[in-house]
Amino acid sequence: MFLTRFALMLMLTFAAPLAYAAGGSDILLALDHSLSMNNNDPGRESLAGAELFTELLGADNRLALMTFARSVQLITPLTPAEQARGRILVALRRIRMDGVRTDFETLLREGYAHLLDKAAESGAGGSWNGQLILFTDGQLNLGNEADNVTARAAILDDWLPRFAAAGIRIHGLAFSPGADLDLLRELAEATGGQAFQVENPRDLQAAFLRLFEQTDQPSSLPVTDGRLEVDASVKELRLLVPSKPDGEPVRLSAPGNERLQASDRRANLDWKRTQRFDHITITQPRAGSWRVEGGAGEPRAYIESDLDLDVILPVMATRDEEVLLVAQLLYKGIAVDPSALGAIEFSAEILDSSGAPHDPVVLRPRLMDAEVREAILGFDAAGSYQVRVMARGPGFERSKIAHINILASAARAAPVAREPVRLDEHGRPLPFWFQEGGGDEVVASEAAPSVRRTLSEPASSPDLDPLSAPVKPHQKALAILLATNLAIVVVLGAVLAYWWRARRQSSRSREPLDGG
């Protein structure tokens, strides 16, 4: 019995980090700082939106900031969000809209190099997740049409397959009617990202909020008529309440009828006000019923907790497709059987672009997989939708918002095949130049031209073994887990055999000798 428990403890010790490894992302925020932004965004709402994105981003992510026009400037390299937050917030307030031209090709080249190079430096494993957020108010403009055509071809034929092959998602935010939304959509569709357009500066902060929910996928609590239930496992509560400078001020009612407002000074309370939102952070919030009063709309309630709701939904589909929605509860990153927590109800609510809800959908248990709940969603019209997934059980609630774009027909560009980042024998991404080298090139198009180098590198890359085909991240993690468990079984078997043999020898030594 002792040996069995010891073996189980060792297996969980080794298995838990592998199951929990798929955490944050490496996110590169690239902002257009061309002169036209002065006319299109005189109130600098785009920078206020980028500040909101930076403040909300979870601590398990790394964040970098770039600005671009005719050239690209790396303002802050990839740094853990907690460390980068202060520097990026200061840098955002200093950005000047004085750039000339718009060179998307150079931005993609520099962004690709920085993301993969930093991934290699950090030793990120097979679960590495890179994302590029591209914000622009214009179109590709190098000064003459011939250069524009050449650059656009390089983007679509060279850089797009490389982003897709490395698993880097591109999200595009087109601001102003003159922005090249078609190009952003091509980049997003082929890499599993999203692209959308905002024409009113007042909507920019809400657009960056959508990008935050898409890239970080934070856990949240359902809010109904300003009320939310906080359970004891919630370590941090972050409320984002739409507000107006001249509107009713936001107030909080905490459990025990305690009243909180922006002017309060408490050790566990951080209350920031902007033109569009009140952003309230409460560490170790008291369990019980909370109520948000005032404001100009329904709040969002993001949380940090060991109990999480994981949601899988395609970012894009056509109107005639059946869309599979999958959800499961995680505890410290490990899937749990909902029945072990009591009577849990899983449901989903579809909201169209106007915010109008559709009929709720019930998620049912997957056959032969008690931990997973799923449902088939149908969409009647093309457009942008939110899907709010909820799990309710005894003493807790969880929700998560996913975004999906529904296209009118199947006549869309076929996504470029996604392949994993090339890994070394230890499961770490190889440096940037090795991602392109050798006959085993991890790109979706064999005809893609060689990458234009932006970092210092050797004159020639060492040949890679053509037989060392890349392994998908989840396959690599499973192989490591199986190998680890097999090694544990072998060691325990050897220990048990040694113990059994020693015991037999000891018992024989105590037997009486024959004869008299």
Image: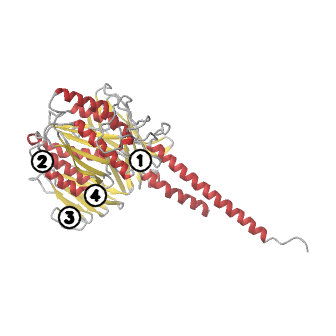
Badge 3 element: strand
Q: Quadrant of the C terminus?
A: bottom right
- Residue labelled with disc 4: 82
Disc 2 marks which residue?
96
- The kind of residue on which mark 3 rests is Arg
**Residue type at mark 4?**
Glu
Q: Nearer the viewer, mark 1 or mark 3?
A: 1
Among numbered discs 4 and 1, the one appearing first in the sequence:
4
Residue type at tag 2:
Arg
Given contact means CB atoms under 8 Å apart, are the residues at marks 1 and 2 in contact? no
CA–CA distance between discs 2 and 4?
25 Å
Q: CA distance from mark 4 to mark 3?
A: 29 Å
Does residue 226 appear in this view?
Answer: no
* Label 3 close to label 2 by CB (< 8 Å): no
Mark 2 neighbour class, 10 Å CA radius: few under 14, some 14 to 19, many 20 or more: few
Occupied quadrant, residue 326: top left
Q: Which numbered disc, 4 or 3, marks the residue that appears first in the sequence?
A: 4
Q: Residue 394 occupies which quadrant of the picture? A: bottom left
What residue did someone put label 3 on? 259
In contact (CB < 8 Å): disc 1 and disc 3: no
* Residue 507 x, y percent position in the rendering: 76, 68
The residue that label 1 is drawn on is 328
